[in-house]
Amino acid sequence: DNPKQAREGVKEVHFLPFNPTDKRTALTYLDQNGKMHRVSKGAPEQILELAHNKTVIEGRVHGIIDKFADRGLRALGVARQEVPECTKDSPGGPWEFVAL
């Protein structure tokens, strides 16, 4: 519940603000152990495009989005990746779709 506590030990390296073209935002950060990670949230379709296993999960993701829509709800997708090269400009490892 406390954003400061959730970010404790995390150092922001780069923030990509939301823009209407990409329909997502991203944050590159170092964890308390010095490992670099990247997270992104945005339109589920855009986040799904990042996922390394898109073809495996897209049916399930679309099914959940449709159930949300039936209830008048919109969805956001969330993905994460490790960045072993430890540079903000590196492509990083495979993206993992983690949540709607």
Image (cartoon, rainbow, N blue to C red):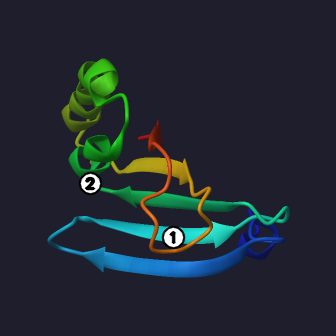
98 relative to 53, above or below: below
Query: Which type of secondary structure does the marked residue at label 1 adopt?
Result: strand
- Eye-nearest disc, 2 or 1: 1
Q: Nearer the viewer, residue 15 or 74?
A: 15
Among the two numbered marks 2 and 1 on one chain, the one whose residue lies closer to the N terminus? 1
Res 59 quadrant in image: top left
Mark 1 is surrounded, within 10 Å at the Cα level, by few (under 14), some (14 to 19) or many (20 or more) other residues, namely some
Of the 4 image quadrants, the one containing the N terminus is bottom right
Q: Residue at x 46, y 48 (%)?
A: 79
Can you give x and y, in whole percent of width and height, for residue 87 in the image? 56, 72
Q: Nearer the viewer, residue 94 or 40?
A: 94
Can you give x and y, in whole percent of width and height, for residue 7 in the image? 74, 70
Query: Which type of secondary structure does the marked residue at label 2 adopt?
Result: loop
Q: Mark 1 is on which residue type? A: Leu
Residue 73 seen in the figure: no
Of the 4 image quadrants, the one containing the C terminus is top left
In the picture, measured across the screen, residue 13 lies left or right of residue 40, that is: right
Q: Residue at x 51, y 58 (%)?
A: 39
Mark 2 is surrounded, within 10 Å at the Cα level, by few (under 14), some (14 to 19) or many (20 or more) other residues, namely some
Can you give x and y, in whole percent of width and height, for residue 89 in the image? 45, 74
Q: Residue at x 53, y 50 (%)?
A: 81
Q: Residue furthest toward the left?
A: 21
Q: Residue at x 77, y 76 (%)?
A: 4
Res 41 quadrant in image: bottom left
> On the image, numbered disc 1 is attached to which residue?
27
88 relative to 71, above or below: below
Can you give x and y, in whole percent of width and height, for residue 34 in the image? 79, 66
Q: Mark 2 is on which residue type? A: Ala
Res 48 quadrant in image: top left
Q: Which mark is residue 43?
A: 2
